[in-house]
Image: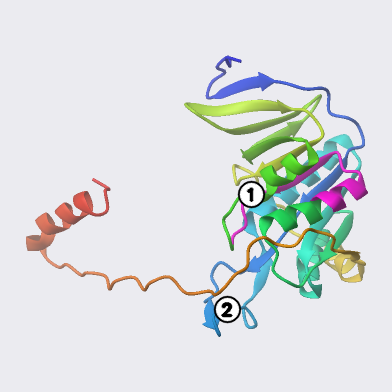
Amino acid sequence: MNPTQVGEVYPYWIGEECPAMTNIVVLVKQVPDTNARIVISDDRVDLSSVKMVMSPYDEFAVETALQHREVSGGEVTAITVGGAKADKVLKDAKAIGVDHIVRIDCESFVDSNALQSMISNAVTEIGADVVYCGKSAADTGAGSTGPGLAERLGWASVSNVTSASFADKISVVAPAQGGNARISVTLPAVISCDKGNLKVRKPNVKGIMQAKKAQVDVKSASAPPSSINVISHSLPPSKPAGKTYEGGAAAAEVAQLLRDEANVI
């Protein structure tokens, strides 16, 4: 299908109208604060003293899910996978405005295959029409959960979405060669969200108080055994010390380094 250019956006229309009262799921993950100092202890990452936060791209997924609910009605359920400590990320999502919070109980490491299987089972049990997630997690950067989940469910999948609208159809914008593509999405679908121009809402006092009282629906994990085992963790090599240049006499050498090593001029 050849798109017709409209400004910098290329539209594609595929699918049916967005159903009313949509059952919406958003996936959230607890990750180390991106400013935290990571420590290795006994060949494993030690997160015992690290502040944990919602993965940044998941924040955009939550915002998109809430905007979808505001237009179509229905309810938003936030799902995470992890132990009891992961309840915090669900409470954060609840404070922002999701309706229900679900944790798939799993303390041990699981690979992407097992993770997607667990989430797929939960999404099917909930009876979701659409799943939103971040394009990738801040701790792994793999970006496999959205497309992998869609494959398991047999649903449509769109990744790197920077904006969405929910008038007659779900219409999203994602990068494409030569610009952006506007894509009308058939439900059910999994939509992976990038930053774009979204302004993520902040929790208010009422939302924070409701989140504190909210009950997490804990579901037992059911997944195939992981096919990958982590043998050890290690920090990346230390960066070489920076170079300092002073005075006009160094200008030529600095310009050469910027050209040859940094590729900025």
Quarter location, residue 85: bottom right
**Count of labels in the image:** 2
Give the numbered dot on residue 44.
Answer: 2
Residue 144 position, x and y percent, is 63, 49
Residue 142 as seen in the image, left or right of residue 238 = right
Range drawn in magenta: 120-138
Q: Residue at x 59, y 42 (%)?
A: 196
Q: Quadrant of the C terminus?
A: top left
Quick one: 136 or 113, which is closer to the camera?
113
User: Magenta stretch containing residue 122, yes or no?
Assistant: yes
- Distance of mark 1 from mark 2, alpha carbons? 23 Å
| Residue neighbourhood size for the residue with mark 1, other residues' Cα within 10 Å, grouped as few (<14), some (14–19), many (≥20) | some
User: Magenta stretch containing residue 210, yes or no?
Assistant: no
- Contact, mark 1 vs mark 2 (Cβ under 8 Å): no
Task: Establish if 188 lies above or below 226.
Answer: above
Give the numbered dot on residue 144.
Answer: 1
Residue 80 position, x and y percent, is 78, 60
Residue 248 as seen in the image, left or right of residue 55 = left
Quick one: 146 or 174, which is closer to the camera?
146
Q: How is the image coloured?
A: rainbow
Give the numbered dot on residue 136.
Answer: none
Residue 26 position, x and y percent, is 78, 50
